[in-house]
Amino acid sequence: MRDRAAAYAVAAVLLLVSASAAFAHASLVRAEPADGSVSAAAPSRLALVFSEPVSPIALRLIAPDGGAETLKRFAVKGTTLEIEPPAGLTSGTYALSWRVVSEDGHPVGGTVAFSIGAPSASGAPEAEAVDEALRAAIWAAKVALYAALFFGVGGAFAVAWIGGPSRSGARVAAAAMAAGVVAAPLSLGLQGLDALGASLDALGNPLAWTTGWATSYARTATLAMAALGLGLASLRARGLPARALSAAALLGVGLALAASGHAAAASPQALTRPMVFLHGAGVAFWAGALAPLGLALAREGAGALDALRRFSRVVPFALLPLVLSGLTLAAIQLESAAALVETAYGRVLLAKAALLAGLFALAALNRWRLTGAAESGSRQARRNLARAIAVEIGLVAAILGVAALWRFTPPPRVLAVAAAEPAAFHIHTDKAMADVTIAPGRAGPVTVSIVIMTGDFGPLDAKELTVALSNPAAGIEPIRRAAVKPGDGTWRVDGLVIPAPGRWQARLDILVSDFEMVRLSADVDIRR
């Protein structure tokens, strides 16, 4: 029995290490026209391709003269946002400013610049400021909602099914769910503020709430409210109705967490969404039983030992799918062990693992030293077990607080998609122009593709083309490679190794004829 319980405790730790892998951000993968590109004519469509599905909030096109127009004609097709450009675009540089909401309700914004005919002077977009007060409010509301779903709904399920005979346990569950009834809709308003880039002062503005309701997070908030309502109703019922209501509420927890979020949106969704569902419902079952059970043992209520025995018997059936779903989601989000230390997401996971180490040690103490003695009738063992469960609750609460930080850290799988994207830039002079793509756009082995034309967009049949990359700030002299023309109209350099990230100077030496050489140059940022 003790060996089996120890295995359950180990499984619980593995589960919680991989828990809550559902919160991060989408990233822009590609734009059409490409950022920095120059075309001879106005584009027939604008497109933004993201790493996962998004919902647009604000789309604006800033003209060369500084005038801005809101773009209202668009369509979302999978991960691609297609936008109909305004008619009558003239020559010059345009800035497509976009702001979208990812699957977990997190807003992401940016600007893509492209030119028609020839570039014109334009300022670089400013980086988005971080509103720490708003972030703190979003984090607090998320922690409160977690507590309501896991301790509240899970506690109501434990009272109805496991027995937790202490009235105090039911009151704790009710209080947690009551806080969730406030936190769930409040989270929508905060999501709206974040999506709009507004501050907490604008929380009373109806636009913040309508914007929050338009995000995918609204599905989670709605289902969470339904689960909380069912959980509260179960506490007022008895017998079979209480069990039915609490079971429906527990299922609602899983549905709420699977309704949005990056883990649920990851491919293949036929796997990830059920995994999130099992994960959320399982954590609620496990964590929710702690408070009713601990309070019943502390007050030595009638039936407390029976509830302890029932919990010990049924918890294995919840832990197995919990562990499998948690590890599956963690593997999808992390993609590699190195991401644990190389990414903010991984470092949050490590901080959570440190808390779990303490939880594991306490669980081992409970199983091997206290549970058996409590079941045999020792009052002191029961009191000690109740105190240990209280500490467990505190550790679980701390873990939920750490997990809520994932709201602000993109998962490694999203970063990997962005890292694999090429670095593209355009060089335009009177004599010649070039579209250059370095894939992937990060340090290491890359392939350079070049399309060259005359300055007026005509064909340019060069005899030779040489690429030179240098990084004076890092003391790296030019790395020169001759490009080849494989026959598809592009010039290529394969197997070029860029030794370090940073801002590099790219130069193209184009031999137009035996007597004419054209040199084009531009800076390009190479990612780590």
Image (cartoon, rainbow, N blue to C red):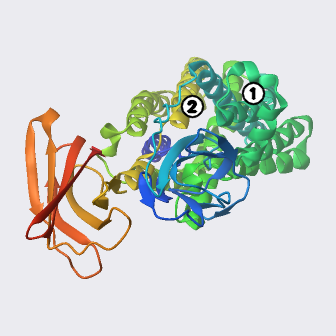
- Front residue of this view, candidates 498 and 250: 498
Observer able to see residue 287 = yes
Residue indicated by mark 2:
400
Q: Position of residue 213 (x, y in %)?
A: 78, 42
Q: Which kind of residue does numbered mark 1 sit on? A: Ala
Observer able to see residue 79 = no
Instruction: In the displayed orientation, state which residue is furthest to the bottom.
Output: 487
Q: What is the quadrant of residue 87 in the picture?
A: bottom right
Precedes in sequence: disc 2 or disc 1: 1
Going by the image, does 54 lie left or right of 512? right
- Front residue of this view, candidates 291 and 175: 175
Residue indicated by mark 1:
176
**Is residue 148 shown above or below 323?**
above
- Front residue of this view, candidates 11 and 107: 107
**Is residue 208 shown above or below 216?**
above
Quote the CA–CA distance across marks 2 and 1. Answer: 14 Å
> Of helix, strand and loop, which one carries label 2?
helix
Residue at 52% x, 34% y is: 408
Quadrant (top left/top right/bottom left/bottom right) for the C terminus: top left
Q: Position of residue 152 (x, y in %)?
A: 74, 33
Q: Position of residue 100 (x, y in %)?
A: 62, 46
